[in-house]
Image (tube, grey):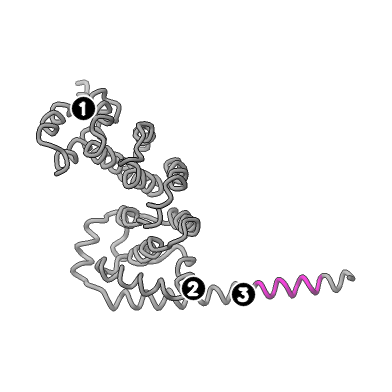
Amino acid sequence: MSDWMRATAESVVLLSRAKSCKGSEKKMERITQEIQELLFQLRDEKYQKFQSSLIPTIEKETMIGVRTPYLKKEAKKLAKRKEAEDFLKNLPHAYFEENQLHAFLIAGICDMEECLHRVNAFLPFINNWATCDQLNPVIFKSHKVRLLASCREWLQAKEEYTVRFGIKMMMDHFLEEEFLKEYAGMIAGITRQEYYIKMMIAWYFATALAKQYEHILPYFEENKLELWVHNKAIQKALESHRITDEKKEYLKTLRRQGCRKKV
């Protein structure tokens, strides 16, 4: 093949790829616009004001005000359409409810590897605790070994909500019969100072006290946790209905006082 023919062939390929990309972009724009219009039709302004007060990390203007049951219902409908693929690719989203819809779509994926691929693509774009905590893929329950490997990676991530997600997955899937003491050590070893990570660590240990009391108690008796996490975990454990009154009374004695500042 001559240089001219080769150059012409390469130009045709590049042009074809460019057209394909533009076509994909248009499809993503169409489904996104359709979804946004639908979400605004479902808008509840009073609920928007209430919900925005619970999630201070995102701008109020990015919250439409759609209740969760409606979002889950629309996610089931969208999952049956081929356009769902285009919506999942179109990141980042403009609105909180789009992120919620995205999370609910992922939760219904039945193939483990595809689900993990979608989760990993989405995690860097999560910017609030609600979306993070409502991302609960059902398929994870059937693939604990693969999930554990991913959790170890998420716990080391730089993004705040990816770490929070990893902790929550360890709490949701590895505090029952799969529990090993080293897992609690993994969570205790996280030294990040972001509020929503520390809060999830506290939630993990409060839940662990309810499910693995004897194994987890030494973390409090020996002061292995950061002061704020230690006390917050005890607070949440005292609010739990799964911990006996006798154990709660003992946990109260383990609350720690902060260091006094020098005068």
Give the SS element for disc 3. helix
Q: Which residues make up the magenta segment?
A: 7-17
Q: Is residue 9 magenta?
A: yes
View extreme (top): residue:
262
**Vertical order, 103 against 257 (above or below):** below
Discs 3/1, front? 3
Task: Depth check: give the residue in front, 166 or 26.
Answer: 166
Q: CA distance from mark 1 to mark 2?
A: 52 Å
In the picture, measured across the screen, residue 5 lies left or right of residue 261, that is right
Which label's residue is closer to the chain start, 2 or 3?
Answer: 3
Residue type highlighted by circle 1: Gly
The spot of residue 46 in percent (x, y) is: 18, 69
Discs 1/2, front? 2
Residue labelled with disc 3:
20
Which label's residue is closer to the chain start, 1 or 2?
Answer: 2
Place residue 195 in its image quadrant.
top left
The spot of residue 168 in percent (x, y) is: 33, 46
- Tell me the tag on residue 258: 1
In the picture, measured across the screen, residue 92 lies left or right of residue 18, that is left
**Vertical order, 166 against 85 (above or below):** above
Task: Depth check: give the residue in front, 7 or 140.
Answer: 140
Residue ID at (48%, 57%)? 121
